[in-house]
Image (spheres, rainbow, N blue to C red):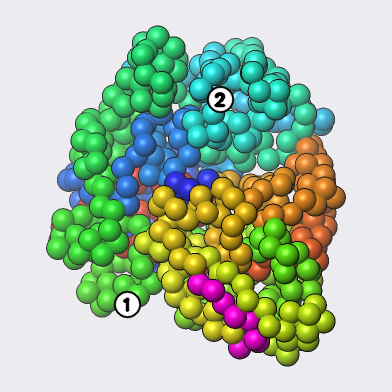
Amino acid sequence: MRATRPARHRAPRLLGAAAAVLATAVALTGCAQSQRDTSSSDGSSGSGSGGGTFVFAASSDPVMLDPAFASDGETFRVARQIFEGLVGTQPGTADPAPLLAEKWTGSADGLTWTFDLKQGVKFSDGTDFNGEAVCANFDRWYNWSGVNQSGNISYYYGSIFKGFKTSDDPAKQGGIYGGCTAPSANQAVVTLTQPFAGFVQALSLPAFSMQSPTAMQEYDADNTGGTEDDPRFSSYATEHPTGTGPFVLDSWDRGQQVTLKPNESYWGDKPKVDEVIIRTIADGNARLQALQAGDIDGYDLVAPGDIEGLKSGGFQVVNRPAFNILYLGFNQADPALADVRVRQAISYAIDKNAVISQSLPEGSEPAIEFIPDTVAGYNPDVTTYDYDPERAKQLLAEAGQSNLTIDFNYPTDVSRPYMPSPEATFTAIQSQLQAVGITVNPVANKWSPDYLDKIQGGSDHGIHLLGWTGDYNDPDNFLGVFFGQKSNEWGFDNAELFQALTAARGLPTRDEQVPAYQQINEQIAQFVPGVPISSPVPSLAFASTVQGYQPSPVQDEVWNTITLSES
């Protein structure tokens, strides 16, 4: 998720180096089992005293509080406290784990998925969570019509399920959802019209949280009886979001803060704090100062340059396991970049280690492909273009581009998990390109509202910095997003690559997908659509009093584990 999600963009094992990072953050971490328990990894309970108000600074307001209509990280941050899905994630990883579904089984053809549900769970309004409630949610998504099918409203359902029951747009007609039945209160069976091996992984997205059918009908969640044009701002989405999670909405002062209180009927381990406040502080320096002043207890997206000062000041800094990719993209609509020799030359010109040391957090490692090494289908043996400025000059000469001048687009006024300091990253790469004879024309745009429109909305750009934080652990969520179809960002039409990605997505099992995506990663490496730079390590900062915060690579952080000790 790029456009709106601060911690994921439009997100196997504990991530190698991240495991060691987490091991050093014992004070903050606990074991977040599918039961959302608060035991630490050694079986002991948290050391905080319990009670109090946990105040967390967000970079922006939620858009609204119905996760089915959301695609931004700040909405999801709040939604994860109120709602739960059938599937969660294993602590510290992006791997799927039981949540409201205790287990699931898939048919051999990948078309039928049976979910055995946790018993005795109720939504916070008292409605039973059962098989019928599951089907009500799936059928709600499938039956959306009109404006509810817009990509900016139902982004995730459209992206994953590829269509709706009926649509005026032929491209949105049908999709892969085949229906849902509830053989019993404790079971739901979902059928697909074609296989999708990443189906279970995708269900860990907050967009597919289970919501109370009673509350959605009572408060017009789809805005079918309202007068507004945008269903995201229904009474349900702004005042009455109703899930099964450990917290419920208390109040929302738009532009200021969201206040949550414990869900007294929660089926799992109940929150230890009395109240949670998510305060909106857009400026990164202001978030830092608020923590130092004791006005907040923690915040996300810590600037790399602030880390040592926070540590020396007695604050806790914890790294979220990296599940992202920063890349230098090539727009092949530019005639020079349409020549693979030029793309190869730029790749050879970049010293990734130097870029990392000059602009990315400590612990970041060079990337060799467009997915992190924890995603299925990662290929450690892909063709690489290791730093070789002389080879870069040779290729430019062969392409007749020894005096190449090129636009280099980069964003300002933004910090993303994959790109914490874009100006510094631009400066590092610019000097390396100039060293091989490429004249760089800097083109800077503010992230909001200009940069993404520039890169994704038209062809008037050159090489550019962008990236992605994965939503769930499936290669399609990276490679399919980047290279699955024609786009303005990359400016190429590679039918062979598009077809390979479509076919790999539709394979019924992970075992079949892995070799297919490994081959695709090599195909991408030879095509050279851009340069994967790194998977940077995002950081969070907390007061010394905060205990039990479990960082997640996909921001699946639920705050019933948190306690506050005496200062």
- The label shown at residue 308 is 1
2 or 1: mark nearer the eye: 2
The front one of 553 and 503 is 503
Residue where numbered disc 2 is placed: 149
Q: Earlier in the sequence, mark 2 or mark 1?
A: 2
In this picture, residue 381 sits left or right of residue 291:
right
Q: Secondary structure at mark 2?
A: helix
Q: In which quadrant is the C terminus drawn?
A: bottom left
Q: Residue at x 32, y 47 (%)?
A: 60
Residue 510 position by quadrant: top right
> Residue 119: percent from the left, percent from the top?
49, 22
Q: Position of residue 511 (x, y in %)?
A: 80, 47
Q: Is residue 414 left or right of residue 536?
A: left
Give, as a three-letter code, the residue at label 2.
Gln
- Is 274 on the left or on the right of 532, as rendered? left
Instruction: Tell me the quarter of the picture where residue 146 sits.
Output: top right
Q: Amino acid at mark 1?
A: Glu
Name the residue rendered at 60%, 31% in the picture. 158
What span is colored magenta in the figure? Answer: 435-442
In the rendering, which numbered label is found on residue 379? none
Q: Secondary structure at mark 1?
A: helix
Q: How crowded is the residue under tag 2: few (<14 C-alpha within 10 Å), some, or many (20+)?
A: many
- Could you tell me if residue 186 is visible in this image? no
Instruction: Report x, y in % for residue 443.
Output: 49, 67
